[in-house]
């Protein structure tokens, strides 16, 4: 643990080289792997993330700041919010009053509760993030969240936030989130629901997201999860346009096998339906399969080799300078170094 007084410091550096069999050019799409998040740049070396975390446990008041650089920062923060929180993954204060029976209150910017994966690759089984993580759910929120241990196995919470992936809201409305986590020794079940206005410059029309994940750990070496997401965005009718209701949904199944102390294997499969193109920009049905091998050199130092294949029922993937095809195959080699209180 790296500490200065009551503050704990941690961080990571995550870099990779990716090869895309379609060889998309810079002129075609910026030379990226379509559908990918933080390791999207292809046929080159790139920095996915460099991160520094400063953390003080709430006792009863705490604070956390996560600073990020690299592709993760560029993708998390769109051009509309770079002026307010660029290079910040999380920044919030926490309160854990002694007489509130474990209830914690956080205020500021924090990552979403939705999803089976997280932003930091070393805490995921696969190196590339799933389609569900990249397209079905938000990355982060700004506002207030609570969590309360209702029983020994069940923790519930409420969030009141500005919306999806923003600090300053553009419509004046708030999004409400309800979170639930039920935990037993060999499985846990997370259920999250977000609802609120997400259309630009109007509070008319609500976006709904249902996200649920079941994590299984039948043995000390074998783990698995099933993640399902359903999203819906309503747009209200105006004098010149009719109202609409876009839907997207998908399911991901993944498993991880710890073969030895140093080696592990992970496999993930997904299906994602973006029937009106609201999430990905194209009305399509997507599938992907990812196989990842991880080798742990030492505490805090990992390397990964990953093969991934994506399919669509539409010519969605860039090939060369101008061609569009319905599939994409990539091979990625990554190195991740991290330090801090949790390894």
Image (cartoon, helix red, strand yellow):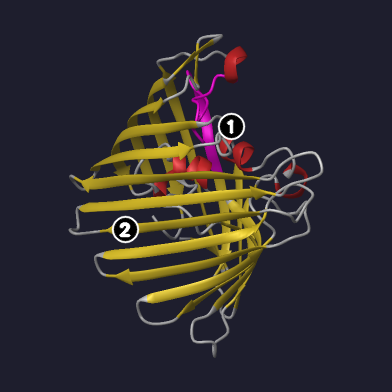
x%, y% of residue 314?
46, 23
Give the residue drawn at x 55%, y 29%: 282
The image quadrant that residue 1 belongs to is: bottom left
**191 vs 72: above or below:** below
Q: CA distance from mark 1 to mark 2?
A: 30 Å
Q: What residue is disc 1 on?
A: 281
x%, y% of residue 64?
60, 63
Choose mark 1 or mark 2, whichever is in front: 1
User: Residue 327 colored magenta?
Assistant: no
Q: What residue is disc 2 on?
A: 215
x%, y% of residue 335?
41, 35
Give the residue drawn at x 49%, y 82%: 102
Looking at the picture, tell me which residue is in the foreground, 191 or 265: 191
Dot 1: within a 10 Å radius of its alpha carbon, few (fewer than 14), some, or many (20 or more) residues? few
**156 vs 43: above or below:** below
Q: In the rendered view, does 112 fall on the left or right side of 19?
A: right
Residues in magenta, as a range = 30-50
For the view shown, which residue lies furthest in the bottom direction? 99
Residue 313 is labelled as: none
Give the mark nearer the N terminus: 1 vs 2: 2
Looking at the picture, tell me which residue is in the foreground, 112 or 244: 244
């Amino acid at each position: 643990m790296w500490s200065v007084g009551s503050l704990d410091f941690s961080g990571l550096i995550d870099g990779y080289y990716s090869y895309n069999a379609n060889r998309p050019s810079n002129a075609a799409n910026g030379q990226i792997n379509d559908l990918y998040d933080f390791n999207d740049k292809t046929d080159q070396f790139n920095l996915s993330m460099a991160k520094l975390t400063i953390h003080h446990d709430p006792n009863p008041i705490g604070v956390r700041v996560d600073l990020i650089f690299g592709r993760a920062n560029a993708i998390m923060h769109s051009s509309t919010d770079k002026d307010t929180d660029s290079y910040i993954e999380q920044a919030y204060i926490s309160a854990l009053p002694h007489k509130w029976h474990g209830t914690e209150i956080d205020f500021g910017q924090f990552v979403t509760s939705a999803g089976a994966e997280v932003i930091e690759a070393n805490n995921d089984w696969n190196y590339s993030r799933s389609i569900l993580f990249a397209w079905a759910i938000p990355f982060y929120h700004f506002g207030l969240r609570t969590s309360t241990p209702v029983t020994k196995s069940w923790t519930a919470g409420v969030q009141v936030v500005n919306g999806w992936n923003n600090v300053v809201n553009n419509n004046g409305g708030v999004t409400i989130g309800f979170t639930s986590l039920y935990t037993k020794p060999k499985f846990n079940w997370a259920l999250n629901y977000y609802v609120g206005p997400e259309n630009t410059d109007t509070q008319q029309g609500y976006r709904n997201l249902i996200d649920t994940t079941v994590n299984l750990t039948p043995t000390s070496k074998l783990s698995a999860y099933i993640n399902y997401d359903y999203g819906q965005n309503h747009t209200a009718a105006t004098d010149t346009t009719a109202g609409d209701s876009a839907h997207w949904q998908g399911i991901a199944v993944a498993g991880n096998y710890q073969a030895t102390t140093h080696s592990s294997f992970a496999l993930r499969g997904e299906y994602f339906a973006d029937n009106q193109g609201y999430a990905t920009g194209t009305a399509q049905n997507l599938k992907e399969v990812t196989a990842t091998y991880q080798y742990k050199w030492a505490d805090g130092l990992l390397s990964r080799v990953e093969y991934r294949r994506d399919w669509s029922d539409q010519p969605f993937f860039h090939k060369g300078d101008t061609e569009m095809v319905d599939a994409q195959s990539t091979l990625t080699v990554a190195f991740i170094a991290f330090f801090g209180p949790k390894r």
